[in-house]
Image (cartoon, rainbow, N blue to C red):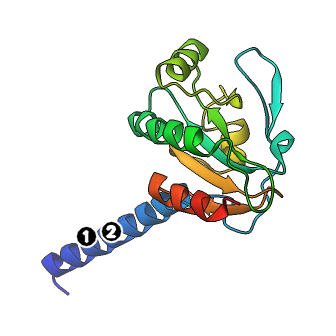
Amino acid sequence: MNRKTLLVFSTLIFFVVVAFISWKVYDSYHQLEFSNGDVIPDIQLPNQNNDTLSLYSLKGNLVLVQFWASWCGPCRMENRDLVYLYSKFQNAEMKDGGTFKIFSISVDKNKLNWKQALEHDKMLWPDQVNDSLDFEKSISQIFNVHSIPTTFLIDQKAMIIGVNLSPMQLESVLEKRIK
């Protein structure tokens, strides 16, 4: 093999290896720890008043677990849809019992920004908590959440029945589950 062919072959192998490694890293960041059918573990985090809220206190309801942040543009856009869906379904009785709840987990490090976003976006549901340790710690790490917004829809027994549903998909699921 001449020198030019060896150089081209080596360069090609190098790029194939780099592409493969990049794909594996990208893929691992987009795989969530939990999927449909899994029972979600309890989450206990402080709310705006520093009182600890527990996800399991909402058992018996259909719950959307939302990971978001005030600095995340797509999250803020999703909040508008969630405000609409919450107002539409919060009092609707579900076939398997309970109502629709949202358990929002902010990954904001700055609690003032989080509180201002709650007010600005009119996120009026009571179950708002903050995981100020960000993505690499605590709850976000347990759920393997590396990007936001990320959502899990769980049933009355805390079993995941939807992951990252679009607002239209979520509305469709809720419509089907109303009594």
* Occupied quadrant, residue 46: top right
Residue 121 pos. (x, y %): 48, 25
Q: Is 157 drawn above or below residue 124 in the view shown? A: below
Amino acid type at image mark 2: Phe
Q: Quadrant of the N terminus?
A: bottom left
Q: Residue at x 52, y 31 (%)?
A: 69
Relative image position of residue 110 (x, y in whole percent): 57, 17
The x, y position of residue 176, in whole percent, is 61, 65
Q: Is residue 142 left or right of residue 85?
A: right
Task: Say which mark, if any, is on residue 42.
Answer: none
Compared to residue 97, the image places residue 47 above or below, namely: above
Q: How far is disc 2 from disc 1 in space, using C-alphas?
A: 5 Å
Judge by depth and name the residue closer to the eye, 99 or 164. Answer: 99
For the view shown, which residue lies furthest in the bottom direction? Answer: 1
* SS of the residue under disc 2: helix
Horizontally, is 93 left or right of 31 in the view? Answer: right
The quarter in which the C terminus is drawn is bottom right
Q: Which residue is mark 1?
A: 11
Rendered residue at 79%/61% (across/down): 96
- How dense is the environment of label 2, judged by Cα within 10 Å: few (below 14), some, or many (20 and up)? few
Q: Secondary structure at mark 1?
A: helix
Q: Mark 1 packing: few (<14 Cα in 10 Å), some, or many (20+)?
A: few
Type of amino acid at the residue the image marks with label 1: Thr
Q: In terms of depth relative to the viewer, which is nearer, 36 or 120?
A: 120
Residue 156 place in picture, x, y as percent: 80, 56
Above or below for 68 versus 163: above
Residue occupying the point 67% across, 29% down: 128
Using the image, tell me which numbered label, if any, was put on residue 14. 2
| Contact (Cβ within 8 Å) of mark 2 with mark 1 | yes
> Is residue 160 depicted above or below 4 in this figure?
above
